[in-house]
Amino acid sequence: MIQNRRHSSHKYREGLDSDWGLAQRKGRDLYPQMLPIRARLTEFFDKQPISWLWTETVLLAFVIGAIDYVTGYEISMVLFYSIPILLITWYTDRLSGVTMAVLCTIIWWWADEASGHPYTSWWLQLWDAAVCLGCFLFFVTVGTAARARILLLERSRKLEQEIIRISEREQRRIGQDLHDGLCQYYAAVGCAAGSLKHNLEKAGAPTAKSAAEIEELIMKGVGQARSLARGLAPVESDERGLQFALETLAASTSQLVGIDCRLHCDSPVAIFDNTSANNLYRIAQESINNARRHGHATVIHLRLETEGDRVSLEIEDNGTGLPQPVPENGGMGLSIMQYRARMIGGQWSIAPRPEGGTIVACSFSQVLPHTAADTDESH
């Protein structure tokens, strides 16, 4: 049984039979290590004044020109001039990139001339300089287009996150209105029906049975409304709301579907962003539905863990597993899970389980409250 294999999870992580699954997991492990380096570099250049950035890129261009002179005209260093050009284009604007391209062309001209490159005609040297300038301007065009594209993607992502946040907030509001309004109203009606049934029973009226049936139907309606309200807002706005919601999800799945579904959480897991918690819950919910409907699983275990600012969720089952070979384009459920993971800046993977079944994993880094406070104090 899966419950006897809790300590074997690291073993099957490294020993997955599928190369695809192994690549997914390696990428998930390496990607978070690359993020701080990229973030630090981006922050380093973003926080610099324009004058400093110009000074650094101009010095870099002259260093490349000096290396170009030392290596001689037989070894071309043209591609290396793209580094200062792309840097100044990315962090300033197109005009600055063009200016840097002209400067790099002049430096290249000097290095080519100083290294003693023989030309049979002056226009050949002019032609080479024009080709270099065209190449450098191409770097400016590529850098400008890439920067515009990435900024557009970033704006689209922020807009998508805001749409999801608004959607989750509206669902939570509707769920609260159902629970606090409609459910309470029908609960009061149910109590009135119960009181009517009691009075009719005391009077010995034959309609007491009908009143009892009405009371039962009303209370069943109240239960369904509460379930609907809970489904619209499954995760409470609390640090441990996700942990409690997953416990309820596992218990209700075991009770209603009749399969062994459990949550393993060795220590309390606090998630400080309710949107991220809701997205993780939906991933777990979709994974359970897939395992039950498509994988015909009888045992589903969820594992929620945290280490530092890293939160990870794994859902494993003993179903039929993934089809082999794994299709490039999964179903709508897989796409939605990938989308939700991307919206919280997380990494999502799905892989076959060696003993049979499937492992779905999602992890993301959250901003801890003390980290945010320290940041504010540093400013």
Image (cartoon, grey):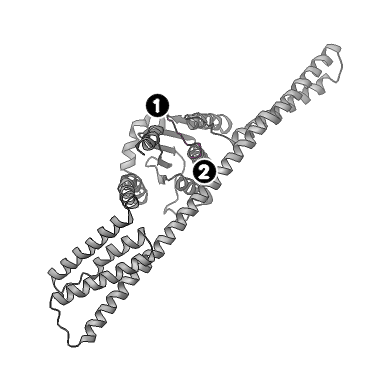
| Residue at 38%, 68% in the rendered image | 141
The image quadrant of residue 216 is top right
Give the residue at x 45% y 53%. Answer: 154
First of labels 1, 2 by sequence position: 1
- Please say if 378 is above or below 118: above
Residue at the spot of label 2: 290
Q: Is residue 356 visible?
A: no
**Residue 285 falls inside the magenta stretch:** no
The one nearer the camera, 21 or 375, is: 375
Give percent across and percent down for residue 369: 41, 33
- Element at badge 1? loop
Place of residue 8 in the rendered image (x, y in percent of width and height, measured from the top left): 33, 34
* The N terminus lies in quadrant: top left
Residue located 49% across and 43% down the image: 295
User: Tag 2, which secondary structure?
Assistant: helix
Q: Which residue is mark 1?
A: 267
Neighbour tally class for label 1: few under 14, some 14-19, many 20 plus, Cα within 10 Å = few
Q: In the rendering, at what x and y percent does residue 267 appear?
A: 39, 26
Q: Is residue 90 left or right of residue 224?
A: left
The magenta stretch spans which residues? 266-275
| Magenta segment main secondary structure | loop
Q: Is the C terminus in the top left, top right, bottom left or bottom right quadrant? A: top left
- Residue 225: image x %, image y %? 67, 32
Q: Nearer the viewer, mark 1 or mark 2?
A: 1
Going by the image, does 342 lie left or right of 47? right
